[in-house]
Amino acid sequence: MLALTAVAVSSRPLHAAGFGAAELGVIVNDADPLSVRIASFYRARRRIPAANIVHVRLPPGPLLTAGQFARIKRRADAQTPARVQAYALAWTEPYRVGCMSVTSAFAFGFDPRMCAHGCSPTPVSPYFDSNSRRPYSDFHIRPAMMLAARDFARAKALIDRGVAADGSSPLGTAYLLDTSDKIRDVRAPTYAFASFAAGMRVQVQILHADVLRNRSDVLFYFTGLPRVADLGTLHFLPGAIADHLTSFGGELSGSHQMSSLAWLEAGATGSYGTVVEPCNFPAKFPSVPIVMRRYLAGETLIEAYWKSVAEPSQGVFIGEPLARPFRPHAGAQHVVYPSSGAHRDDLGRATR
């Protein structure tokens, strides 16, 4: 599982032209006035074509049944132009469909094979660490991200941060916390390889700590804890990505753990959390080296984040999908370890 989430910092070029507004569909819940308002503002701010606005009516609450979702998905598919490659979902609830997250359900369709029975793996996404720019054309999936917010003011701030991030090439820092919670800190062994993924574009600080405080340059923040303290002391740069590996961060309301929504409310532009118990399988959470490498190479938030999760069926992606702080560069790095000269993957294993 760890091998899946720490893919090589390879010489393979990243063709990171990025999604544009014409390729993004916005699904609006006409039964929710806040959803309607968020979708309208987002369409205007990102200049989304009117034909890309998809109208559905969702029942209230955090959970959809498979039957409810099947009817909604048919309506959404019927309205979606073929050019649309990904979705923005303009609501906070529902965030779950049966055993799946709502973002994965819209991406793949509801599929019982995506369910985990106990601590078991789920299917690997064909979009994982791919160079595809057209996931619907290539794989017949439309990655989805929720424009999640408790009120319009927070939604507007999120969208404005995403737009402000575009092409800004921020001089930020990636803070990777190796905490005392070793059950949830299973991504920590990959942090060293994130430094190679970052190259010279951002600073990387690997901290053996449970808390990050009083930093003004946060571009990435990854940790493994059920709750993250002192977010109010941090300043997140526009386009920042942050998440905490725990069981129910994707329960955006009513969770006994910290909701991933707290990251957006603290100033991040994208986050991720699981809605069904994932156990501590690294493959069910974002790979830190992959998301950093792809985001820094110029992919949009939704592309880089989605491509970093090998098994995304239980996880919900939230944020402003078109945020794109970095313009594309020639390609990813090719790491050569000086001790032997052999090319190695992100687990330090020799490759050919």
Image (tube, rainbow, N blue to C red):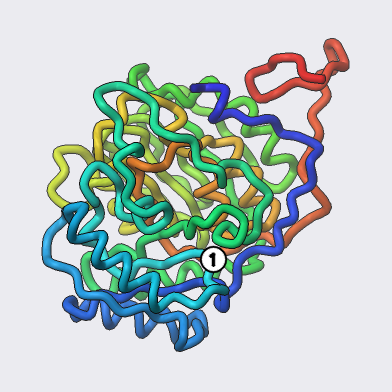
Determine the residue positioned at 43% across, 36% down.
285
Determine the residue positioned at 42% across, 55% down.
107
Where residue 141 sits: x, y (%)? 49, 56
Image height check: is 192 above or below 155? above
Q: How many marks?
A: 1
Near-viewer residue (131 or 241): 131
Determine the residue positioned at 29% across, 45% down.
100
- Few, some or many residues within 10 Å of mark 1 (<14, 14–19, 20+): many
Give residue 349's quadrant in the image: top right
Image quadrant where one finds the C terminus: top right
Where residue 309 sits: x, y (%)? 49, 40
Q: Disc 1 marks which residue?
A: 85
For the residue marked with disc 1, what is the amino acid?
Gln
Secondary structure under tag 1 reads loop
Q: Left or right of 180: which side holds 205?
A: right
Near-viewer residue (201 or 246): 246
Where residue 215 sits: x, y (%)? 46, 46
Determine the residue positioned at 58% across, 60% down.
300
Image height check: is 24 above or below 276? below
Q: Is residue 226 visible?
A: no
